[in-house]
Amino acid sequence: MHYKQMMKDYQAKGMVSEKKMWEAVSVLENPMACLKEKDPRVYDEAMRNLHEVFCGPHYNECFAREDVAEMHHKNAKGETIKGEHWNMEQVNAAIKGMNIPGNANAWDVYVALNANWHDKESKFSEWFGDKLEQRIIEDAINYYFLDADAPEGKMWLYINAMDKK
């Protein structure tokens, strides 16, 4: 029997309760720790899928910091630049007064701004000079949050799709 079928069978028999759910979570703690050790990629995908069940396609602090820490690009000098460019305080200051629509949260914006900086810093520096940072911020907000035909949680979906490479 497969896990999902077993759970459906228990639900059909009226055996599901919050107490039982928490007991089941406890039973899976050690196997999940084993999975994390043996196949971290599958573990991360499972954790992200669980997160999305509860929070939708939106970031929380843990996943946002993890994803931003992995970001990198080469600048005009050929140097590899990694991780956070803007911290959360700087992100909040940068978007003060901007309307971020939908269910996007501050961690979605934090990831979007840092991702856009890594993706576009070199070219935008060439194009916009000292207005580089403001243009990157505006571009990120427009691309990730003001795109009328984009799906809910575009930032989360984009980064998770990029990670599947």
Image: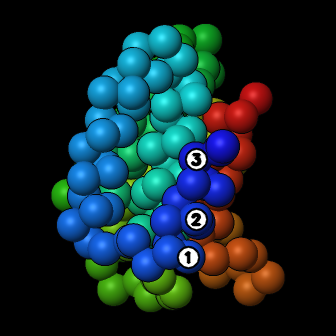
Estimate the spatial distance between the alpha carbons at disc 2 and disc 1, rounded to whole Å. 5 Å
Report helix, strand or loop for mark 2. Answer: helix
Q: Is residue 46 left or right of residue 89?
A: right
- Snapshot quadrant of residue 156: bottom right
Say whether residue 13 is visible.
yes
Few, some or many C-alpha atoms within 10 Å of disc 2 (few <14, some 14-19, many ≥20)? few
- Left or right of residue 53: residue 19: left
The answer to whether the residue labelled 2 contacts the one labelled 1, judged by CB atoms less than 8 Å apart, is yes
In depth, the one of 155 and 21 nearer the eye is 21
Give the residue at mark 1: 12
20 versus 11 height, above or below: above
Closer-to-camera residue (42/154): 42
Residue 89: image location, x then y, percent: 20, 58
Q: Is residue 101 left or right of residue 144?
A: left
* Disc 3 secondary structure class: helix
Which circle marks residue 9 in the picture? Answer: 2
Residue type, label 3: Tyr
Quadrant containing the C terminus in the rendered view: top right
Residue closer to the observer: 89 or 129: 89
Q: Is residue 2 left or right of residue 102?
A: right
Residue 161 percent across, percent down from the top left:
71, 45
